[in-house]
């Protein structure tokens, strides 16, 4: 295969350290007007000066308040990807799926119900000789891409949670179930049924005079993936932990995050549905990030940022990776409820014990509007 020297593991896309904290911190903000944003993100990565991977992503996101305690959020994106290797250019482009999320708060924001839909509008039935190869490059866990795959099947998620104020501290928890429907990922016409997901979410935040501290944790388990109703793969359980803090002093704001993602062993099955291996395909991840926002007046916000991501070794003889990121963002208000922003981030690092050199950058621009 074209890039087997770098893609040592075929599997699901690597997951950046992140947790969902809707239960404790996602309460509906009363009086928030409808809003939306659109823009583009250009990502470029170079792997040992041998492989170049580029992505242009165009996202659209929106928020619509339906009632004081009921809201709808939606998101969609298109992506154009190119893999350059040995004088050969391979491409994968198309629309992603449309995602809808409806949130309902009850009992003075003490309980939250959420229903989400993944509508299968994105590109599927990829070619093996070109588009599949690009998709595998996007799935490398040490690279940072906002879109790692395009279309999937119909999806449905249901979440129920609650939060309670204990003085200045808010404590919350939720249960979430994600159903993933069958679809045809490649030109072969085989029906692929990805496993479903069940997650337990907990969170706490502490607010004070000019600061907020947060802690969020998510534990997820998955059912078995099937191909033509035959077991082929089961993703390992995952545990995510994120600690964060924000300190605000009117003209500046300081933020910091520390994240940890722990993975177990994935299972693979043969044609008789017998388990043939159970190994860790992706290493554990550690993230530390910081940012400083200078707000000289109501029209400007300038935010330099820094981050370090460390990925542990897996059990397929890949020793892990270290990626350092340095960047900044400028946001300018150009009218009532209208902001424009530009951001640039540079990455450098290595993988596989230093045998693979990594470098990259990400350029983005956005237009954000709020309708009063």
Image (cartoon, helix red, strand yellow):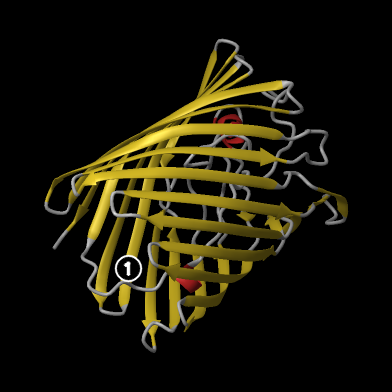
Outermost residue on the bottom side: it is 107
Can the viewer see residue 146 in this picture?
yes
Q: What element carries label 1?
A: strand
Circle 1 residues within 10 Å: few <14, some 14–19, many ≥20: some
Would you place residue 319 above or below residue 109 in this image? above
Left of 298 or right of it: where is 186? right
User: Going by the image, does 199 lie left or right of 252?
Assistant: right
Q: Position of residue 176 (x, y in %)?
A: 56, 72
Residue matched to label 1: 72
Using the rendered image of the protein, determine whether residue 2 is visible from the camera's viewpoint.
no
Give coordinates of residue 48: x percent, y percent: 64, 17
Mark count: 1
Q: Measuring 55% from the left and 70% from the top, which residue is drawn there?
A: 203
Residue 101, image x, y percentages? 39, 66
> Above or below — where is 79 with respect to 295?
above
Q: Which residue is rendered at x = 67% and y = 39% of the image?
A: 310
Residue 329 percent across, percent down from the top left: 35, 37
Residue 73 higher or lower than 85, as above or below: below
Residue at the farthest top position: 87
Residue at 63% of width from left, 69% of height from top? 198
Query: Which is more toward the observer, 187 or 201?
Result: 201
The front one of 216 and 135 is: 216
Report the residue at 70% width, 24% height from top: 1
Asked where in the image residue 226 lies, by quadrant, the reply is bottom right
């Amino acid at each position: 295969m074209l890039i087997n020297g770098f893609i040592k593991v075929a599997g699901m896309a690597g997951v950046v350290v992140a947790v969902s904290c809707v239960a404790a911190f996602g309460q509906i903000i009363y009086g928030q007007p409808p809003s939306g944003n659109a823009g583009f993100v250009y990502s470029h990565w170079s792997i040992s000066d041998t492989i170049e991977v580029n992505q242009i992503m165009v996202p659209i996101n929106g928020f619509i308040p339906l009632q004081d305690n009921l809201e709808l959020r939606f998101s969609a994106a298109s992506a154009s990807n190119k893999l350059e290797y040995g004088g050969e250019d391979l491409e994968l482009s198309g629309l992603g799926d449309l995602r809808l999320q409806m949130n309902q708060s009850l009992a003075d924001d003490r309980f939250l119900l959420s229903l989400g839909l993944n509508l299968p509008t994105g590109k599927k039935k990829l070619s093996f000789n070109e588009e599949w190869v690009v998709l595998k490059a996007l799935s490398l866990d040490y690279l940072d891409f906002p879109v790692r795959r395009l279309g999937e099947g119909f999806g449905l998620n249901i979440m129920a949670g609650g939060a309670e104020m204990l003085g200045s501290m808010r404590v919350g928890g939720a249960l979430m179930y994600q159903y993933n429907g069958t679809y045809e990922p490649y030109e072969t016409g085989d029906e692929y049924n990805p496993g479903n997901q069940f997650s337990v979410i907990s969170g706490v935040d502490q607010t004070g005079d000019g600061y907020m501290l947060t802690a969020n944790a998510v534990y997820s388990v998955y059912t078995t993936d099937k191909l033509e109703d035959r077991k082929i793969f089961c993703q390992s359980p995952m545990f995510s932990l994120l600690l964060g803090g924000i300190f605000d002093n009117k003209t500046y704001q300081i933020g910091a995050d520390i994240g940890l993602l722990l993975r177990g062993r994935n299972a693979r099955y043969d044609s008789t549905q017998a388990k043939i291996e159970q190994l860790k395909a992706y290493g554990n991840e550690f993230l530390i990030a910081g940012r400083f926002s200078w707000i000289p007046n109501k029209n400007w916000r300038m935010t330099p940022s820094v981050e370090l991501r460390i990925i542990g070794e897996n059990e397929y003889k890949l020793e892990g990776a270290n990626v350092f990121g340095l960047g900044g963002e400028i946001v300018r208000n150009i009218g009532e409820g209208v902001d424009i922003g530009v951001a640039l981030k540079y990455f450098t690092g290595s993988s596989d014990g230093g045998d693979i050199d990594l470098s990259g950058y990400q350029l983005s621009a956005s237009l954000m509007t709020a309708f009063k």
